[in-house]
Image (cartoon, grey):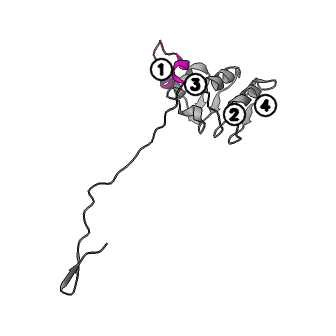
Amino acid sequence: MSECWAAASEIRDSALHLLAGNGTSNLRSVDLEDNNLYDLAAVLRTMTELRHLVALHLKGNPCSTCHGYKGASLQMLPHLEYLDNVEVWSVDRELPPDYNALDHVTSGTLLFQCFRLMGLPQPLPEKMGNKVTRTA
């Protein structure tokens, strides 16, 4: 078996040990997108047992919102070629020499953008006969 596709399967952290069991050592691609994985350190420790892993997909899990998600994943899994369907480049692996992956995976980060429209001009009045009216 070289691929494991378990996206949107409601997998939790407690079931990760099943991935490191018999018959999974040759896995090259693991897709765990959109599950209930919270503990990134536990996920990465499990994935380190998969020596041939080159593609990992964790997008949509709470653990993928950790501030150090990408850096930790690439440091602990140096053979990854794809992370969340994005090719890993050598520049992605450039981390400070004292960088410790597990120090950066303990909290989640929620990023969002909010746009506010300000200062919209009033619509031009329409003339009806001799009377000027405003339209809403």
Residue that badge 4 annotates:
1
Question: Residue at the spot x=47%, y=24% of the render?
Answer: 91
Residue that badge 2 annotates:
12
Q: Secondary structure at mark 3?
A: helix
In the displayed structure, does residue 27 sit left or right of residue 99?
right
* Nearer to us: label 1 or label 3: 3
Marks 3 and 4: in contact by CB < 8 Å?
no
Residue furthest bottom as drawn: 129
Considering only order in the chain, which callout, 3 or 4, is on the residue closer to the N terminus? 4
Residue furthest left as drawn: 130
Few, some or many residues within 10 Å of mark 1 (<14, 14–19, 20+): few
Residue 133 vs residue 88, the one in the foreground: 133
Residue furthest top as drawn: 98
The CA distance from mark 4 to mark 1 is: 32 Å
Residue that badge 3 annotates:
73
Question: Is 14 rendered above or below residue 121?
Answer: above
Q: What's the residue type where badge 3 is placed?
A: Ser
Residue 40 lies in the magenta stretch: no
Q: What's the residue type where badge 4 is placed?
A: Met
Question: Is 7 rendered above or below residue 26?
Answer: below
Marks 3 and 1: in contact by CB < 8 Å?
no
Considering only order in the chain, which callout, 3 or 2, is on the residue closer to the N terminus? 2
Q: Which mark is residue 59?
A: none
Residue that badge 1 annotates:
94
